[in-house]
Image (tube, rainbow, N blue to C red):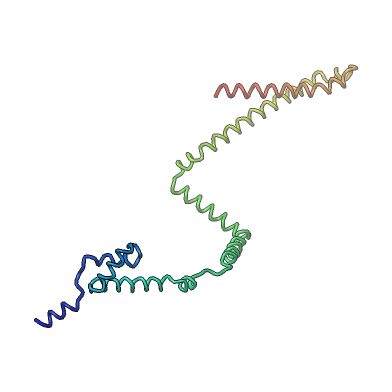
Amino acid sequence: MTEQMLNNEELPQSCSQADAAAAYLDGELDVAAVEEFERHVVACHACASAVADQRRLLCVLDVAFSDQSQREFALPKNFIQVVTAHAQTDMCSLRRPSEKRRALLLSVLLAAIAFALLGASNFGAAFAPARAVWDAITTALDVASHTIFETLTGLTLFVRAFGGRFIAEPGAPQLLIWLPLASALFLLLRLILNYHRQRASE
């Protein structure tokens, strides 16, 4: 019984002011509260133990995050220059012909994989706008080529039929100069009319 009482006296008892130890060490208490807590710590073993534990924890944290520990993990002064040099060296390899061929093969492989995953129908639908633009361009070129061909054919027949008479006349050189200009103007007007007619039909 006596031994149990001694053991109970050695163990620190809980105290209602033990939570104020952290505030005391952080300096959050005013002067009156600090003086009162210091007088209480002298008489209270629980609060004295709590203050000691808090102080040991703060010492451990100060050692762990001291300036010496930060200097051990400090980056070198030329860290940015070294990283920049390595990055430039890595990018130089992309300019080689072998790297370009490898990139081209990789692009073709990715396109084949995308075609296999999406399917031919979905792949065609994805390129439907480009196909529509290509169809419009080919249609315009076809119309222009037919117009030019018909105009040149008519001009050739006209020259064959009336060329001899115009050359024999005194004003033939002037006519031969103005005739191509008139033909070009006629061709331009016909192209414009065909273009507006096609837009109206669409």
Q: Residue placed at 12% from the left, 83% from the top? A: 3
Depth order, front residue of 41/26: 41
Q: Is residue 110 left or right of residue 174?
A: left
Image coordinates of residue 7 in percent, x first then y, are: 16, 80
In terms of image quadrants, where is residue 92? bottom right
Image coordinates of residue 123 in percent, x first then y, are: 48, 43
Q: If the image is split into quadrants, where does the N terminus sit?
A: bottom left
Q: Is residue 182 left or right of residue 80?
A: right
Q: Residue furthest left?
A: 1
Q: Is residue 16 left or right of residue 193?
A: left
Depth order, front residue of 195/20: 20
Q: Residue furthest bottom?
A: 3
Depth order, front residue of 45/164: 45
In terms of image quadrants, where is residue 179? top right
Image coordinates of residue 93 in percent, x first then y, are: 61, 62
In terms of image quadrants, where is residue 104? bottom right
Q: In the picture shown, does residue 35 fall above or below 116?
A: below
Q: Residue placed at 29% from the left, 71% from the top? A: 51
